[in-house]
Amino acid sequence: MTQPSDKALVPFVSVDNMMRLIHHVGIEQMLQDLAGYVEEDFKRWELFDKTPRVASHSDVGVIELMPTSDGEAYGFKYVNGHPKNTTEGLQTVTAFGLLADVYTGYPVLLTEMTILTALRTAATSAMAAKYLAPKGADTMAMIGNGAQSEFQTLAMKAIIGLKSVRLYDTDSAATEKCARNLQGLGIEVVSCKTPEEAIEGAQILTTCTADKQYATILTDNMVGSGVHINAIGGDCPGKTELAAGILSRSDVFVEYPPQTRIEGEIQQMPEDFAVTELWEVITGQKQGRSGDRQITLFDSVGFAIEDFSALRYIRDRIKGTDYFIDLDMLADPDDPRDLFGMLQRAKA
């Protein structure tokens, strides 16, 4: 039988190979690299196709597709969000992604994105904090100590120099897990009994809880002047973490307003509530942090361009390595018009 040509083979990065790649590069280096790729793409934001993600909601969760293209490459991610999964021993979020060549339409990469999404989300948070957090910020409150918490902490350490993290979760076992995982990684870890205790002395407040509900993780009176809030848990309709009063007192920065108004913290606010797009800050068109008493809020829901950046990075990083396998997933007849003939010859 005719062997597929190189053009018909698609590099596939499995979970095992993704973990091997991360350990080869080093997790903090990889977070820095991913932040760099995301920042590069935010600087050329206007080139991209942009649309809110395509969501299919059910009573127990959501399944979404997140597509975008810069005209040369096309990428999409499949991702779910099922908060009830942890009670069944399953991940709340799983994902995979694909990158394709726009000129031919051929896929050029297929990869796991459950781990990669955690990395790109953390890298994006820290990239935003670089522009929005108070100068010299070195202490973060991490409220919600689930699957994202260690990645968020290490990204802030690698990219803005975080020295201390103060942990709180309604489930003390989650806090113990996070503290244990961060042990020996060069950052001070303080486990706290209440969210109020966690935010004491913190210049960055990160909220990342899983339950799909209108929650008030931070009340208005908990947030003083001069902090940066990294709100990453509100990521679908019907799910928020912050009191509306906090939004009213903050300068709010978002990825893509049409998506954030549906899914983010600002779904609580009027449709004309003023926000600044993060790419405008990165390109110098708009101001980020402007004063010591300002409250900045990154209302992060995750956007397809960030996944595109992560897919670009993986495509570039695996070249010349053994951190992938080739998949024979594209039909490749000798004569492009003779697909049936290829099928018949395979029988022989």
Image: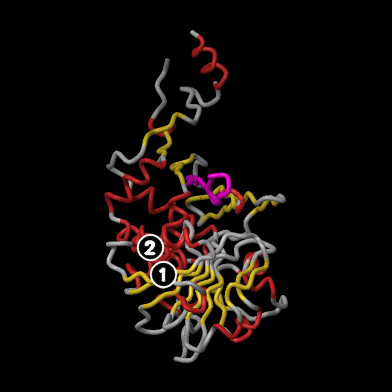
Query: Residue 1: x and y, percent?
Result: 42, 15
What amino acid does circle 1 point to? Ser
Q: Which residue is mark 1?
A: 191
What amino acid does circle 2 point to? Ala
Q: Which mark is residue 179?
A: 2
- In the image, residue 8 sits, relative to residue 56, either above or below, namely above
Answer with the quarter of the image where residue 240 lies: bottom right
Nearest the camera: 137 or 169?
169
Answer with the quarter of the image where residue 12 lies: top left
Query: Residue 65: x and y, percent?
Result: 60, 50
> How did the renderer colour the structure?
secondary structure
Q: CA distance from mark 1 to mark 2?
A: 7 Å
CB contact under 8 Å: marks 1 and 2: yes
Nearest the camera: 152 or 48?
152
Magenta-drawn segment: 86-101
The number of callouts visible is 2
